Image (cartoon, rainbow, N blue to C red):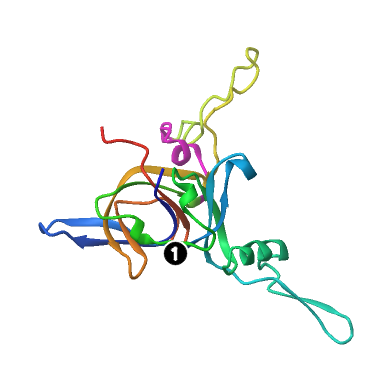
Amino acid sequence: MKKAILAKKIGMTQIFMEDGSLIPVTVLEAGPCVVTQVKTVENDGYEAVQVGFEEKKDRITVVDKSGKKEVVHEHGTGKAMQGHFKKAGTTSKRFVREFRFENSAEYTPGSVIAADIFAEGDKIDATAISKGKGFQGAIRKNGQHRGPMGHGSKFHRHQGSNGSSSSPSRVFKGKGMPGHMGTEKVTVRNLEIVRVDAEKNLILVKGAVPGPKKGLVTVKETTKADA
């Protein structure tokens, strides 16, 4: 892998192509990402590039004259990570991820990875945490069929038989049941980039990308060749 970037999902829209066709696209604010560390085989046992994305405030402890301590931005970046970012010559970042580039040695701490590493026509894999759907029944969660809706039926939207009474006297693993739906790591492969706006750090991807608006999306060059 030679190209990857962290992005924020802006939303969906549609654009006209040169041939007049209308294409639905997902708009991603891709980077800029700052290289915060370059990992090497000698120091870390493997090669990778660590990048940071999106600004984050620092957590600061203030002591007044009476000796009372007060924490400013309690959920901000702690001292350890503040030092890590300072060493790389950058400000604190909200998201930190690693990419195993084939050319990791070419990067240096403080260098910037921007949207212009991708071009129109590139194929990518987009990874994000899917939208949360809350607690759902077996029909919506697992795509199961409902039972008869007549008044005499005692089976409408239940998940079906849970197990035999004497043998095996248990519920098999993987049985489709109601439960929490969504909020899972999802990767959509082989998506096409239809437009790149390097000035605004925007990438327009054909079709849908997983995750909610303002959610973090990891964009990598695809590992799936065209069928």
Q: What element does badge 1 sit on?
A: loop
**Residue drawn at 60 percent across, 17 percent down:** 164
Q: Nearer the viewer, residue 26 or 79?
A: 79
**Residue drawn at 54 percent across, 43 percent down:** 47
Inspect the magenta stretch and tell me whether residue 161 lies in it: no
Q: Quadrant of residue 10?
A: bottom left
Please tell me whether residue 111 is drawn above or below residue 102 in the rendered image.
Answer: below
**Residue drawn at 68 percent across, 73 percent down:** 73
Q: Which residues are magenta?
A: 133-150
- Residue 8, percent from left and from top: 44, 61
Q: Which residue is mark 1?
A: 32
Q: Nearer the viewer, residue 150 or 147?
A: 147
209 sits to left or right of 186: left
How crowded pointer 1 is (Cα within 10 Å; few <14, some 14-19, many 20+) is rated as: many
Residue 47 appears in the rendering = yes
Residue 27 appears in the rendering = no
Instruction: Find the residue positioned furthest to the left.
Output: 19
Q: The N terminus lies in which quarter of the figure? A: top left
Instruction: Find the residue positioned furthest to the bottom.
Output: 65
Please tell me whether residue 179 is drawn above or below residue 30 in the rendered image.
Answer: above
Q: The C terminus lies in which quarter of the figure? A: top left
Instruction: Find the residue positioned furthest to the right.
Output: 66
191 sits to left or right of 112: left
- Residue 167, percent from left and from top: 63, 12
Q: Nearer the viewer, residue 163 or 4?
A: 4
Q: Quadrant of residue 114?
A: bottom left
Q: Quadrant of residue 12?
A: bottom left
**Residue drawn at 43 percent across, 33 percent down:** 144
- Residue 122, percent from left and from top: 28, 49
